[in-house]
Image: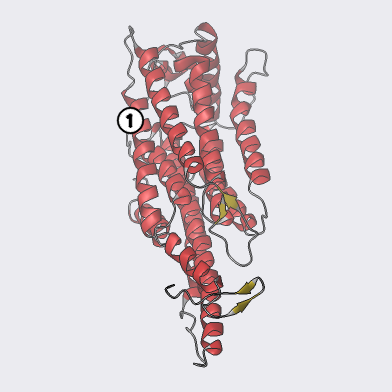
Amino acid sequence: MKAVGRSPSEPISVVPHGTESSAADVIGALLLAGCATWTLYTAAGRDTHPEGVLLGLLAVAAGYAGGRVAGAVVPVGAPAVVALAVGAFALLVPGGLSGDPAALPLHDMDADGALLALAVGAACCAAHAAHAAHAEHVVSAAHAASAARGEGRGQGRRQGPGRGWNRLLLGGLALGITAEALATGSVAGLLACGAALVVAGSATFARRRVPVLVLLALCAGLAAGAPLLLARPSGPPGVLSSATPLADQREALWHDAVHEAAGAPLRGVGPGRFAELSPAAQESATPGGASSAVLQAAAEQGIPGVCLLAGSFGWMLWTLRRSPGPTAVVLTAAGALTALAAEAAVSPVLSYPGITAGAGLLVGLATARPLSQPQLQAQAQARLRPAPGTQTAQGYEPDGGGSD
């Protein structure tokens, strides 16, 4: 066990090393394989379409692997480039982020808002990583200056110019992406971007990861349970119908999802069959999902499918807890993922592979171990090690010369 990824203003965070760190990756791989296996099992012997679920799982795995590699090579630049690319694409090609022009207009807006929320999280992660790198640079410069004065040279490394502005520029990028969410017209997407910003700002003052991650998990659970309470047979009918016709249709989809899940609680009706069996989906001009990731998983893959979905989100939070990165980066990524989970509870945003790939990418970026970190730690230990031939508190340090 060792403490890494810490800035001078941040408390020491002990993270796993070696076997303990690899355990999270192994469990994640097993969980991903379990999701794919259960999807194929629920599709066996029936006229189903599991390709969409399998494509989403593949997108998550590809995004996570890409994030781990990019975050290890360029810890600050990788999330910044991702956020800038999403923001630029949303500005140049409005409505083009959803990847499905045949979907309902509001569903397109929700997908755009979800991807923009992930981009806000990536920009804030880059800002916190830049601040941690800047603080590490200041500490290294101070050590070098002290060593130079001790050796009589009288000068040390100067602080890199412009490093302090990186955080402000990346914070401005996050605000700009949030402003773009207004253009999508998605209330859920705008709230998700705002929630990601709030968590990112609060993460600066967080001293421990576990309480914040537990609170975020509770928020995601409450958001996922809200459609279930509204759609249950004993629930008040027409709660959302007074808002808009689309809200009325969404509530009808939730009722159908609960009905299908109650009829087949173990295996569900099969992946991709909800749109064929739901009267509300058939009445729609462009049939889609259940407008809720949890209810659609319950209807198509039964209770085990819901457990696997909840386990996947829990694994993301757990692997973020064990990340070697700064605490602010970890909590910012967790906040963006929780905002996505809350939006997915009331809209079919997880049906788009681009969204699931973005979620995996963000987790990979936040859990990557920078390649330069071992060298930095070796240099820090070398600075703290007494020089040969000097008197230490424990006694005389030999000069390391050969013995007779």
Q: Is residue 356 left or right of residue 156?
A: left
How many numbered marks does the figure carry?
1
Residue at image position (45%, 16%) is 301
Q: Few, some or many C-alpha atoms within 10 Å of disc 1 (few <14, some 14-19, many ≥20)? A: some
Which residue is denoted by mark 1 in the rendering?
55
Residue at image position (38%, 35%) is 352
Where, quadrant-wise, is the C terminus in this rendering?
Answer: bottom left
Q: Where residue 385 sits in the image (x, y, percent)?
A: 54, 71
Image quadrant where residue 52 sits:
top left
Query: In the figure, 167 relative to 297: above or below?
Result: below
Q: Where residue 367 sits in the image (x, y, percent)?
A: 47, 48
Q: Where residue 110 sits in the image (x, y, percent)?
A: 46, 39
Q: Where residue 390 sits in the image (x, y, percent)?
A: 57, 80
SS assignment at label 1: helix
Residue 245 visible, this orientation = no
Residue at image position (45%, 14%) is 278
Front-most of 381 and 207? 381
